[in-house]
Amino acid sequence: MNNDKKIQQQEKKKLGSIEILGCVGILIWVVVLFLRGRNVSHNNTYLFVIGMLPNLAAAWISTAIGKWFIIRVLKRRVTTDVYLLLCFSIVIFSFCSELIYERYFSSVFDIYDILVTAFAQIVIFVVPLLLRDESIKNK
């Protein structure tokens, strides 16, 4: 039991790849907000990328916050299974968000938003595993 507390304290102090990607997500969101306020270009590719980047950023930020919540609030270790469930649930929430906006706000269902979120979750799931991030434990 005492060993688990030491491990949790070490996990709280480390800045891993998930937290770094969460910070990158915040930076992406700030840059996009800055660029949307300016008429930089009317190129369709540019507008598409500026429209998709907040979904990528939000997915990374949500994953970092979810990991923080699991460690600090629930006081649990983040295993590979829990981490996979967290990443999958963020994609499901993105899908539900699109359904809600389509149903109640007369917005168009945008499959590209979900695809970008799924891509972001694949990246943020695979990168820590490839880097052998110590905050993600195998059972």
Image (cartoon, rainbow, N blue to C red):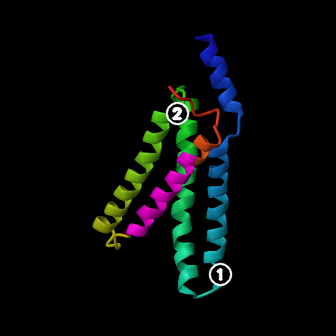
In the rendered image, residue 123 lying in the magenta stretch gets the answer yes
Q: Is residue 73 above or below residue 16?
A: above
- 105 left or right of 52 in image: left
Q: Which residue shows up at 32% across the image and 61% down it?
A: 100
Q: Which residue is mark 2?
A: 70
Q: Amino acid at mark 1?
A: Arg
Identify the residue at the far front of this view: 130
Q: Which residues are magenta?
A: 111-126
Give the secondary structure at mark 2. helix
Residue 118 is inside the magenta segment: yes
Earlier-in-chain disc, 1 versus 2: 1
Tell me the quadrant of the picture where the N terminus can be found: top right
Identify which residue is drawn at 52% across, 41% down: 66
Residue 22 or residue 83, whichever sits in front: 83
Marks counted in the figure total 2
Give the percent coordinates (x, y) of residue 91. Answer: 42, 53
Drawn side of residue 58 relative to residue 97, left or right: right
Residue 67 sits above or below residue 44 on the image: above
Q: Which mark is residue 38?
A: 1
Residue 73 sits in quarter: top right
Q: Amino acid at mark 2?
A: Ile
Residue 122 numbered tag? none
User: Where residue 131 sits in the image (x, y, percent)?
Assistant: 65, 42
